[in-house]
Image (cartoon, rainbow, N blue to C red):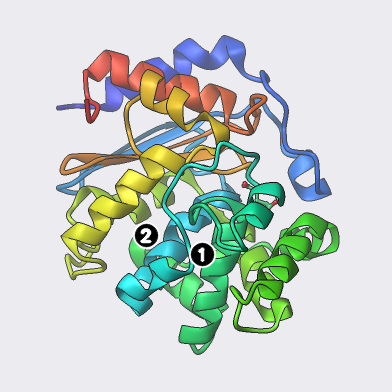
Amino acid sequence: MDFQPVLDDIVSTLKPELGAGKVASYIPALARVSSHQLGIALRTREGAEYCAGDATTLFSIQSVSKVFSLTLAMRNLGEVLWQRIGREPSGNPFNSLVQLEAEHGVPRNPFINAGAIAVADRLVSTCGDGRAEILALLSSLCGEAVAFDEEVAASEAETGFRNIALANFMKGFGNIDNDVAPVLDLYFHQCSVAMNCVQLARAIGYLCNDGAHPLDGSALVSDRQARRINSLMLTCGTYDAAGEFAFRIGLPCKSGVGGGIVAVLPDTLSLCVWSPGLDETGNSLLGMKALEMFVARTGLSVF
Ligand code: GLU
């Protein structure tokens, strides 16, 4: 199937709405990004790539990084990882402390902040250099060198009071093994990675290819692990709107407050959309619309 006309049509149809939504404003580097941008990229399982709009503009991947850190931790730890982290949607804000108290410091899932911080702790324990391993993984998956945005990482650290609280809280329950400082340093850096839609659509390709590396075909994770990551994305990947995403789009997705959303159609293709304006759930407003249009126009979804 030639996806180019579909992507071009999505971008031109949404053009009049550019600027809708609210750009994340908790740090200056995100607040100054123009909301008048929309990019979309798609990669088939066989490696054909298509893109439209601002698909090669770098943006802050933020919580999209949680898929890749989880992937590394699942590779390093296997089943043992799940002794520390649950697999249920939280039904609470992504940075909530309340549920963590009631559940004795065990985060509901790896995609809320507490869960991703617990994953970062596992990476600090199992990687020689967690920061380097994240960058190496992402660069290898997209075949291009990717980097941290050190300004974003520093601002995350300066303003990340809730994340600092979550890490200390979990440590109080014995669910963080390392000092909180290196754990948070890794978490803040993974959030700060800058990538574009083309790179992310390629990088997430292992989730539509039974866990095989999109470029060299080696086993990044097992088929079973890839299925599990996809199911976590479907049920927990888009903050408190996972039900709405499943209802309107029906693809495993992971979003971030930088406005990026990756999406996977298992065995078929992977996608990344980006538009910085967010809706009230913290998901990219036009990104969600673009995915909804993609599914409506192609009839492709897991359901
Ligand atoms: N750096 C953000 C935080 O931890 C990530 C937000 C997000 O994309 O969900 O608060």
- Percent position (x, y) of residue 54? 52, 34
Question: In the rendering, at what x and y percent does residue 77 appear?
Answer: 36, 77
Q: Residue at coordinates 66% horizontally, 18% vertically from top-left?
A: 20
Front-most of residues 235 and 295: 235
**Callout 1, which amino acid?**
Val
Decide: is 109 above or below 80: above
Query: Could you say where residue 104 lies in the image, as x and y percent from the top left?
Result: 61, 62
Q: Badge 2 is on which residue?
A: 142
Residue at 64% from the left image edge and 24% from the top image edge: 279
User: Is 262 above or below relative to 109?
Assistant: above
Q: In this view, does 280 lie to the left or right of 290?
A: right
What separation in Å lies between label 1 and label 2 (alpha carbons)?
9 Å
Residue contact at pointers 1 and 2, CB within 8 angstroms: yes
Mark yes or no: residue 95 visible. no
In this picture, is 144 found above or below 294?
Answer: below
- Locate residue 250: give its quadrant: top left
Q: What crowding class fits label 2: few (fewer than 14 Cα within 10 Å), some (14-19), or many (20 or more)?
A: many
The amino acid type, in three-letter code, at marker 2 is Cys
| Image position, residue 238 (x, y; %) | 50, 37
For disc 1, the neighbor class at 10 Å (few under 14, some 14 to 19, many from 20) is many
Q: Can residue 149 be seen in this view?
A: yes
Q: Which of 79 and 181 is in front in this view?
A: 79
Indicate if the residue with disc 1 has its beta carbon within 8 Å of ligand 1. Answer: no
For the N terminus, the quadrant is: top left
**In front of the other: 165 or 83:** 83
The numbered dot on residue 172 is none
Tag shown at residue 146? 1
Residue 187 position by quadrant: bottom right
The total of numbered circles placed on residues is 2
In the rendered image, the quadrant that contains the C terminus is: top left
